[in-house]
Image (cartoon, rainbow, N blue to C red):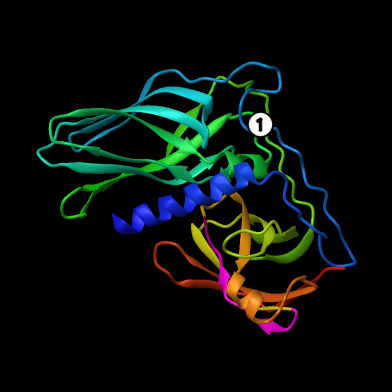
Amino acid sequence: MKKFLWVLLVILISISLAACGGSSDTGDQGTSTSSSTQSEPAGASASKTGKKVSIEEKVIFEQNDFKVTATSLDPTGSIFGPTLDVLIENNSSKSVTVQARNSAVNGVMIDTMFSCDVAPGKKANDEITFSSSELKRAGIETIKEIQFQLHIFDADSWNTIVDSDPIVITTNADPSFVQEYNDDGVLLLDKQGFKIVAQGLDMSGSIFGAGLLVYIENNSDNDVTIQARDTSVNGFMVETIFSCDILAGKKAFDSIIFAKSDLEKNNIKEISEIELRFHIFDAKSWDTILDSESVTVTFE
């Protein structure tokens, strides 16, 4: 639980900084061969037709003495993002914690904030919050489809009780609506069903360091984790903060963060060159799927 609270704290800090910092300086898009144009999403609030999307109340999980009902969707949600209201019923003899994992909106991996404790024989109303900053980065204005899995574990022993199959919830958005994805940028990897594109630098002054914005497609049959290895900035080796979990058939917009301490130690104030390679492994077995060759991105 301490690990979860720390992750939650990091998410809250990151979202708060993004909300208070205004527009970030994405800098050059990288290399002299290509440049990308960032989309300007308005956030996830209402559909392009002006209709506020909603869902019908529905039981989305019922197993092992647990029942979860999705009761409503608020696209404007909280200050952190849209919220899916859920009613959780614990008919077991154990105190449990219910969390959401592997979440996606319109086919894009999106982080959630949700951890609900329910005593035996009790019910709880709670909400799953989808990161507004990540929805904005992905250009998602209309929420058409939500997907996630429920992870239920014993609140005392932390032992897993059940992991649900993927749950898919469809809103009342126009069925003909098709989500568009900005895949412009510099191609870093296109192999074995994996595509990674550099889309510019984020030099906004994150507490963690500068970041390389990336767009990722997983067109393979495997749920994977993608990490960066052997990373250098302007010829100096630096540590990175980057581990992207992406389900088969999904997309992701993420950032490869370069440790602020390493940038300062090497007196790097402007980034002109990044060299790195990617390590991709199966999210369940941890078996290596692909170790890419090193690739270099340059900035003017």
Query: Which quadrant would the C terminus be assigned to in this image?
Result: bottom right
Q: Which residues are magenta?
A: 234-245
When asked about the image quadrant of residue 114, the answer is: top left
Query: Which quadrant would the N terminus be assigned to in this image?
Result: bottom left
The reply, left or right, for residue 224 in relation to residue 264 is: left
The residue under the point 61% across, 77% down is 262
Rendered view: 177 above or below 263: above
When asked about the image quadrant of residue 29, the answer is: bottom right
Rendered view: 189 above or below 156: below
238 magenta-colored? yes
The residue under the point 17% across, 29% down is 122
When asked about the image quadrant of residue 91, the answer is: top left
- State the residue in front, 292 or 46: 46
The residue under the point 44% across, 62% down is 283
Callout count: 1
The reply, left or right, for residue 274 in relation to residue 291 is: right
Q: Position of residue 9 (x, y in %)?
A: 43, 51
- Given the image, on which type of amino acid does mark 1 rest? Glu
Q: Which residue is mark 1?
A: 141
Q: Is residue 119 visible?
A: yes
- State the residue in front, 142 or 83: 83
For the residue carrying disc 1, how many other residues have a C-alpha within 10 Å: few (<14), some (14-19), or many (20+)? some
248 magenta-colored? no
Judged from the image, the secondary structure of the residue bearing numbered disc 1 is: loop
The reply, left or right, for residue 241 in relation to residue 157 is: right
Q: Is residue 165 visible?
A: no
The residue under the point 46% across, 34% down is 168
Q: Position of residue 16 (x, y in %)?
A: 55, 45
- State the residue in front, 67 or 28: 28
